[in-house]
Image (cartoon, coloured by chain):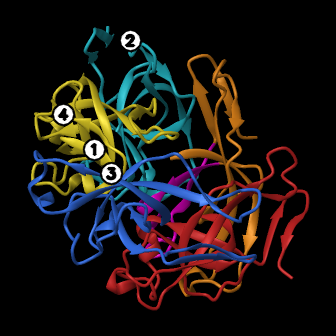
Chain colours: A red, B blue, C yellow, D orange, E cyan
Amino acid sequence: MFIARVTGSVVSTQKAAAMVGHKLLVVEPYRLDEKSRGSLVTTGRTFIAVDTLGAGLDDFVLVVQGSSARLTPETAKLPIDAAVIGIVDAVTTAKQSIYKRE
Amino acid sequence: MFIARVTGSVVSTQKAAAMVGHKLLVVEPYRLDEKSRGSLVTTGRTFIAVDTLGAGLDDFVLVVQGSSARLTPETAKLPIDAAVIGIVDAVTTAKQSIYKRE
Amino acid sequence: MFIARVTGSVVSTQKAAAMVGHKLLVVEPYRLDEKSRGSLVTTGRTFIAVDTLGAGLDDFVLVVQGSSARLTPETAKLPIDAAVIGIVDAVTTAKQSIYKRE
Amino acid sequence: MFIARVTGSVVSTQKAAAMVGHKLLVVEPYRLDEKSRGSLVTTGRTFIAVDTLGAGLDDFVLVVQGSSARLTPETAKLPIDAAVIGIVDAVTTAKQSIYKRE
Amino acid sequence: MFIARVTGSVVSTQKAAAMVGHKLLVVEPYRLDEKSRGSLVTTGRTFIAVDTLGAGLDDFVLVVQGSSARLTPETAKLPIDAAVIGIVDAVTTAKQSIYKRE
């Protein structure tokens, strides 16, 4: 899994039938700053993930990829390869708390 | 999943038998502009995806990868790892609408 | 899937028993030229894929990755993650035919 | 699989129900130094993996990705794509021991 | 699959129970030299793969990734995403033999 920030949303009306009613989020994977490991920094990449937890804009979320994205009750059998499986409250390293949700 | 622009198509006559009759699109993944997050920009990569929705040239589409590409009625049991599961109508971020289909 | 050029072959005698009799090709993924989208250019990467279609050296082929590489009759149950599922006849973009097999 | 160093942990209270009680580690993949192959160096990437072995901060661990992350008794049926399947005691190359756990 | 050189090994005593008795190799993926396609060059990446064929240090091997790594009799049901499925005897391109095992 990876930590990502919710940066937007996608609307699609012509889509696979099973996808109707599922919210599509634009998520941007983050990583630890390589030098200090004291903050989260963007990777600059963009993925689209299905959300079943009500994540909001700018939230950090935990995203699962691949077939495991279908292993929640809400996403079983969907033709998806990425889903939000958690909203991140805190990220801690040896040195400090580097993220805390307000 | 990722957002991609349809940039072409592929013709193959010698192919796995199950692939007969399936349309193969050239798709180019896009990402949010890393600085402003105000537009979609190309990643420069190229994938081939099966289309079951009638996507046209220059359309932005939602592409699923891996085993989940086989989770639509039309693609079940196909030897494919990428399929179009939606035609994108709009992409919205905190600041603005960054894409709207005409 | 991705488009790749067949650039060589691999011989292995000590191998998983199920692999006996399967041809192993060296394939090099190609992408559209990012500026003009008018030609196919190499990505510089190298994969090994099982071939069941008789692809020849320098042919452009369609390669499937992951578990779906096992979804053809000839490759079912093989311990492989890449297979040739088509020989490419033509690639066309908005502007022009950018590849045509001779 | 890849070798990664445990660099932190993640707390999430709103999450997929099956994830309750599972520890989430921040792990950073390492690779051999390309020139000398005499030490492990960071790749600068960040993943989140489920731990079932009690790995501690700064431990090097073996991380499995994809559907196989669900192939341990503790992680079966979880919506995850990365799990710790071993704590690394030693890494040895032709020339020398390049890592030994204290 | 990809071609990789065996560059080391990993010892882990605290590990998923199913992994007991399985040899873990450090493998380094190689690719064709992009200019001449006349030699194999390292990608600088590092993976850990299970070996069931007795590959030795500096051998070139064929590595399968993902769920297919579980498709050999020895690796079925293991929580692994990479396995050696062949020891490479020779790699040949249009121009020449670029690798031959001694």
Label 4 sits on what residue type?
Arg
Does residue B4 lie above or below C25 as drawn?
A: below
Magenta part of the chain:
D61-88
For the question of whether residue C85 can be seen, the reply is yes
Give the mark nearer the N terminus: 4 vs 3. 3
Q: How far apart are the alpha carbons under marks 2 and 3?
A: 26 Å
Where is residue E8? Give x, y as percent.
Answer: 53, 27
> Is residue B55 part of the magenta span, yes or no?
no
Q: How far apart are the alpha carbons under marks 2 and 1?
A: 28 Å
Mark nearer the viewer, 4 or 3: 4
Does residue E88 lie above or below C40 as drawn?
A: above
Give the mark nearer the N terminus: 1 vs 3. 3
Query: Mark 4 falls on what kind of element?
Result: loop
Any mark on residue E38, and which?
Answer: 2
Q: Residues within 10 Å of mark 3 (few under 14, many from 20)?
A: many
Q: Which residue is mark 1?
A: C91
Label 1 sits on what residue type?
Val
Mark nearer the viewer, 2 or 1: 1
Q: Which residue is mark 4?
A: C101
Where is residue B56? Give x, y as percent.
Answer: 34, 66
Displayed quadrant of residue E87: top left
Give the mark nearer the N terminus: 1 vs 4. 1
